[in-house]
Amino acid sequence: MQKKTDAQSGDYVEVHLTKLIYEGVLLESAEDEKDIVLLKLDSGYNIGFNKKDVLEIKVLEKGKETKVEDKIKNDPKKPNVAMIATGGTIAARLNPKKGGVDWLDSTESLFKFYPGVFDKVNVSKVEVPFMKASEDMDYKDWQKIARTAEKVLNDPNIQGVIITHGTDFLHYTAAALSFMLRDLHKPVVLTYSQRSIDRASSDANLNLQCSALTALSDIAEVVLVGHATGNDDYCNVMKGTKVRKFHSSRRDAFKVVNDKVIAKVYADKIIPEKEYNVRKKSKVKLDVKFEEKVALVKVYPGQDPEILDYYVKNKYKGIVLEMSGLGHSPTMRARQGWTKKLKEIQQKGLVVCAVTQCVYGRTDPLVYSNGRELQKTGIIYLEDMLAETALIKLGWVLGHNDWNVKEKMLENISGEFNERLEE
């Protein structure tokens, strides 16, 4: 039988079971789970127990009530940056009473949990177009972010903008903004955290501090800033069209592909690694046209080419094929050959582009006869462009009805091509 306790949600407690004792922060159970005791362990993970199995809940330390900070006063000696919060782990804090998170959507809440960001800048404006996980976003959300960014970037009192974002599909947003924000004149810095702020291993603080410094730099590009290693030493500044998420949980999840990082950024300095577009006196132009009927299709051995009929039937305008090696799919010599079908769907008006499903390298259909056979169907081979970037660019290009699709897809508009490949 459980002993009486005065423990309340937010208290640091011991939960005594028959043979085990757990320590952590007591969480508030949901209305329909009052028979469950929830605990947030020191590791950051939540665990639940049936009340009937709990012998005692012993309070080790009473929880402290959190209070909203007074309004942050801007320091006239510091430059101003804006922040656009869209969701993700980096824009959330633990609410110990409910075992979930509350959004950090104001200057005050940011200062309370990420004070290091304010060391060198005033976060003078926080815009919240929406709050959602990155896997729930689509082109309409990218358009909203782009419109919000245009507004703050064209404010003469703002030096740059930081965009906080979930990690899973962050590189799609980075590519979209790279095309939608034209003639960029100030830094647009996307950043993230893999681990929440209530965990000792959180990467949020360093990522935000490095992002603030990058937002003040002369790097007038859409970039992604995040941990360069698993340690809290420095971050990489990565071009928005040449970056991909490589790991599901490591803090240095994002890496550049076929390119160099633009710069290494520490909490107090930036070290450039390559040339980049520099800050200038002008205004950013918005181009958010986008055709949503585009798809990314991975080619695999024995795949039935009739899968392509789906896209014709459902009135898709274009597809990007992730092909093998230098840009191959099953040909006329295969039992399930693709050559005839590829020619057929393009004659029906479907634009087909090709990238390699290899991580590094570029497509080159001229090396082998299989590639030359496929190229004759009319496929647009996109050299070293990343698959995610290719999908975004194709949707953006097809959104402009008066453009020559092949010419624009092969034009290096936002650094999506790199003649000299880097590892």
Image (tube, rainbow, N blue to C red):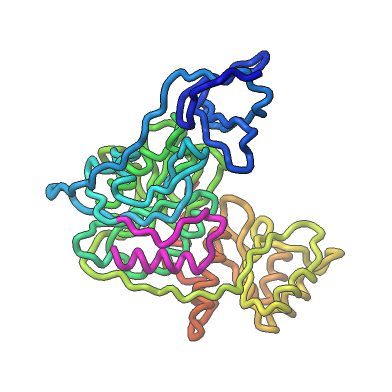
Q: Residue at x 51, y 67 (%)?
A: 139
Q: 229 above or below 219? A: above
Please provide percent x and percent y for residue 246. 55, 45
Q: Is residue 140 magenta?
A: yes
Q: Which residues are magenta?
A: 126-152
Residue 281 visible (yes or no):
yes
In the picture, the quarter occupied by the N terminus is top right
The quarter of the displayed image where residue 318 is located = bottom right
Q: Residue at x 67, y 63 (%)?
A: 297
Q: 338 above or below 171? A: below
Q: Residue furthest right?
A: 335
Residue 361 or residue 279, whichever sits in front: 279
Please provide percent x and percent y for residue 161. 31, 56
Please tell me how many numbered marks the rendered image carries: 0
Q: Is 29 displayed left or right of 84 in the figure?
A: right
Please provide percent x and percent y for residue 98. 51, 40
Q: Residue at x 67, y 71 (%)?
A: 375
Label the magenta part by its dominant secondary structure: helix
Please provide percent x and percent y for residue 27. 52, 33
Q: Is 72 displayed left or right of 345 in the figure?
A: left
Q: Residue furthest bottom?
A: 402
Q: Residue furthest top?
A: 19
Q: Residue at x 36, y 65 (%)?
A: 148
Q: Is residue 252 magenta?
A: no
Residue 218 visible (yes or no):
no
Q: 158 above or below 238? A: below
